[in-house]
Image (cartoon, rainbow, N blue to C red):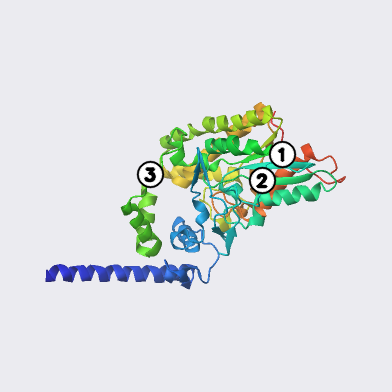
Amino acid sequence: MKKVLFHAILLLLVVVAIEFALRVGFASLMGPSVFFYGTSFHRRDLASPVERSLLLRNLYHRRLRGSGDKYHNVRRPELVAGRYSKYPPYEERYTYDADTGEVFRVGINGRGFRGPDFDDEKKPATVRVVTLGASSTFGYHDPDDGTYPAILERVLRERCRDGPDYEVINLGIPHLRSEEILALFLAEGLALHPDVVTFYEAINDSSPDEAEGDGSKPARHPRRWSKAAALWARDHFMLAFLVDEVITSRRLRFGAAEVESLAGRVPGRFVENVSRIADECRRRGIQFVVGKQQARSMLVPRESIKGITYAQEVALVRARLTEQGYVDKTELGFLIHDRVNAALEQWARESGVPLVDLVAALDGDRDVLVSWVHLNPRGNGLIADAFAGEILDRTCSTAPAGVATRPPGATDGG
C-alpha cells in the first residue's frame, strides 16, 4: 500500500508539473492571463487572436468563452419547436467580440428570436423583410446592432427615405441546417406575411457530421456523465485540453475518396430544401433572394487572409489534400461548402431566383471572418449592403439619382 501511495503521489506531482509547464508556455505565447486557464482570471489582458495553429486558435476562443461557455451561451438554442430549435422567450443569452473579448448581452424577443419584438401584422406602407439562416444571420460574436439583419434595416431606410418604411425580422438560429430552416419558415415565417425573404446559409449542411446523415433531425440523447466530466476537465485543465486537441486532430482526418463521397451527398438535398422555400414564396407573391455564403477553411491564418480569395483558398485546400493525402474536419466542410455554393448558384440561374454573390462581395475583405463563417460588424455591413441593393431594386422607386442600389455581386438567376 505504501508503494501504491508513493507512486500515486509521484504521478500526481508529474501531472501537476506538466500542467504548470503548459500554463507557463502558453502564457508566454498568448498573454499572462492564460496561466489562469479555467478560472475567472482567464479572460484578463486579452491579446489579439492567434491563428498560427489550430491549437492556438482553439485555445484563444476557449479563453474568450470561459469555462462552460459562460460568455457565449448562444451556442445552444434549447427550445425544440417541431423540427427546429430556438430560444425560450426573453431568455438571457451572451456572446463576445472575437477580437476584443467584450461581452454582449443578446436581445431575445418574445418569439425566441434575436431582435426587438414585432407584431404579426406589419404596419401600413411597410416592406417586411424576413432573413433566414443560422449563426451568421443570428450574429455570433456581434452586438444586437451589429448583425447584418439589424444593419440591413438601417441601410434600407436610409436609402429609400421617401419610399416605404422597412422592417427586417431576424429568424436566424445557430446550428440550423437547410431542412430545419425550411421547417421554421413554414411554421413561423409565412405567418408574418413578408414581402421579401432572404436566405444566407450553407456551412451547417456542409459539416461532415451532417453530410454523413440522411438530412433528418438526429435524436437528442442525454449527455453521459463520463462525457460531461471529460468536457469539464478540458475546460479547466490545460493538459486535458491539449490531450483532447491531439486526439481529435488525429481522429478527424479524411482522405480523397471520403471527401468525394461526402461532398456528393449534400448539394442535392440542400438545393431541394431551398427550392421548397422558393416555391412557397412564389405561391404567395413573396420575393425570395438567396445569397452565396462566404467562408474560410481556417487553413490560412486570419492575419494573412486578406488578399486571398475564396476560390484561391479552395485551391489551397485541394492542393493540401493531394500533397498529404487527407484534410481535417474544417477543411472538409469547406470543400463541401464550395460544392453547395456552386449548386445553389446553378439552381438560382435555372429557377430565375435572384442571387447575391456574397462570396464576391467579401472576397477583398475576408479578414472580416472571425471564424470559419462568422462575421464582425464590418463584414455584416458588407452583407447588408449587398442584400440591400437587390431588395431596393425591387421595392423602392424613389432611390436618389446617381445612388447605386444594386452591388456588382447581385445577379438575377437565369
Estimate the x, y position of residue 117 in percent, counting from the top left.
65, 50
Say which residue label 1 marks: 410
Can you identify the residue that label 2 sits on? 169
Residue 384 versus residue 263: which sits nearer the camera?
A: 384
Q: Does residue 14 appear left or right of residue 184 in this picture? A: left
Mark 3 → mark 2, Cα distance in angstroms: 32 Å
Look at label 3 and name its amino acid: His
Q: Quadrant of the C terminus?
A: top right
Kind of residue at badge 2: Ile
Quarter of the image where one finds residue 221 = top left
The answer to whether the residues at label 3 and label 1 have Cβ atoms under 8 Å apart is no
Task: Give the x, y percent position of residue 20.
Answer: 35, 71
The residue shown at (50%, 63%) is 64
Which mark lies nearer to you, 2 or 1?
2
The mark found on residue 276 in the picture is none
Quadrant that contains the N terminus: bottom left
Q: Residue furthest right?
A: 401
Mark 2: few, some, or many residues within 10 Å (few <14, many ≥20)?
Answer: many
**Residue drawn at (64%, 56%) of the image:** 144
